[in-house]
Amino acid sequence: MTNFSMLLSALSGGAVAGICIAAALVGALIGALAYLFISRTLSSKKIGNANEEAKRIIEEAKLEAKTIRQDGLIEAKEQMNKMRVDFEHETRERKHDLQRTEQRLAQKEAALDKKEEQIDKKDAALDKKIEEADKAQRQIDETKQRLKGVEEELAQSQQKVQSELERVAGMTKEEAAQELKATLLDGVKKDAAQDAKRLIAEAKDNAVKEAQNIISQAIQRCGADHATENTVSVVALPNDEMKGRIIGRMGRNIRALESATGVDLIIDDTPDVITLSSFDPVRREIARLTLEKLITDGRIHPARIEEMVDKIRREVEAGIKEAGEEAAFEVGVHGLHPEIVKILGRLKYRTSYGQNVLKHSIEVASLASVMAAELGIDPRIARRAGLLHDIGKAVDHELEGTHIQLGVEIAKKYRESNEVIHAIAAHHNDIEPQTIDAVLVQAADAISSARPGARRESLENYVKRIEKLEEIAKSFPGVDQTFAVQAGREIRVMVKPEQVNDQRTVFLAKEIAEKLERELEYPGQIKVNVIREVRSVEIAK
């Protein structure tokens, strides 16, 4: 019993242990299944979340792509609009340039047509003159034919008379003519040379002294400063970068400046300078002052350029009027029409061979006034005419005609006196001077222009004038050598002593002077000095 109990107890303990083990195995299996179920549930949930997140990201990417595409389209449209605006602006500018070029071409064509018309008129007048000349030549030929018959009859009669005279005198015609000619020629030449020397000496003693006295006093009383002025203005730049600013984007600044002033700007490789070129000196001065102001100010754009040009134009016009009033006040000319005063002031910007025309006019007025006073006549007309004698040069680049014609028209328009108008018309001998005032203005103009340093002359023109001077003097028979001295104000003529005697030198000097007056243009006067030199050489051995 005891053993059975023990065995039963042992079996009961093993069963319990088995049950426990089985229970543990079942629990583990259930845990594994629960873990597997939970894992699958969690994985399904994560996959669903991932899918939702992926869908959200895709939606956001689509929205962002749509936004980027819209922004790109807007930016592209803006760029296209900007390019279209720039293209239209450039097209307008090119169209404006083309219109200006067409206008210039039209003006040139009109000028060429006008010149062609003038040439046609001249050709017609020339053809008419040729016809008249041919008609006159035929009449001359007919007259020559008639005279030829008369000459033949006279020749026959003279031959008969000559034969009779030779028979009576006992010598031929040639022998008698040679003897008579030799006798008369020596006496006539000697008397004529002596009379010519005496008359020339007397005339020089009287005329030269008076002329020297009047001119020396006039020059002494009238002193004027003269500065060299160019027809092309140059503006200095602080640096070469300023050239780019003046040109501007696509050349808009330089086009605006040229359009507003009417002046051509020349920008080349010359460092730190810009050249202004224009036929109108007033426009050139306005452009120069405008450019200097813009460079100093630093603000260079089309609107500022137009504003500055208007401002400078008003200042220059005021300065022109002031210059005309000062010139009239300086020489004591009163009662001038206001428009004449303005036109006179424009001469401040006009030069002639480097001589300022306004200063030249003031000088001519002063010289004419002084000479008139020395001659004992009223100097007011001479002074007024001297101040206005070159007023046509203020507008000769705008209107057609010489400065004399334009000056006469201006004087007539503003009711100047007939004496002043005549002096203006005659100061270059276009018409013969009829009054003392006109002669005085002509003389004063020559003095002011021809005095040393008053005007510049190009080297080429100077050399040509000197060569022509020597050539004219050497064209006379008996002349050996000629030398132009004192810058062409004196010509020394060396003659061959065996061909030209002492009496002939007097007439030769006068003939050379007359030919120079006819054929050569020169300032002032030229002294003709004829030299006849005889040398006898012997060698002592």
Image (cartoon, helix red, strand yellow):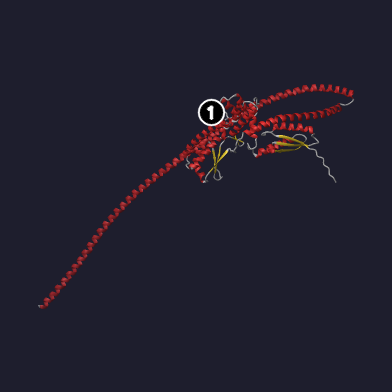
Against 215, residue 20 (above or below) is below
Viewer-proximal residue, 154 or 8?
A: 154
Against 40, residue 1 (above or below) is below
User: As shown in the figure, which amino acid type bears the numbered disc 1?
Assistant: Pro
Q: Residues within 10 Å of mark 1 (few under 14, many from 20)?
A: few
Q: Tell me what residue is drawn at x 82 percent, y 29 percent.
A: 186
Against 2, residue 105 (above or below) is above
Viewer-proximal residue, 112 or 238?
A: 238
Which quadrant would residue 271 be assigned to in this image?
top right
- Where disc 1 sits, the SS reads helix
Quadrant containing the N terminus is: bottom left
Q: Tell me what residue is drawn at x 27 percent, y 58 percent.
A: 43
Viewer-proximal residue, 459 or 109?
A: 459
Q: Position of residue 120 (x, y in %)?
A: 62, 28
Q: Position of residue 485 (x, y in %)?
A: 71, 38
Residue ID for mark 1: 338
Against 65, residue 252 (above or below) is above
- Visible residue check, residue 114: no
- Visible residue check, residue 504: yes
Say whether residue 59 is left or right of residue 438.
Answer: left
Q: Position of residue 393 (x, y in %)?
A: 59, 32
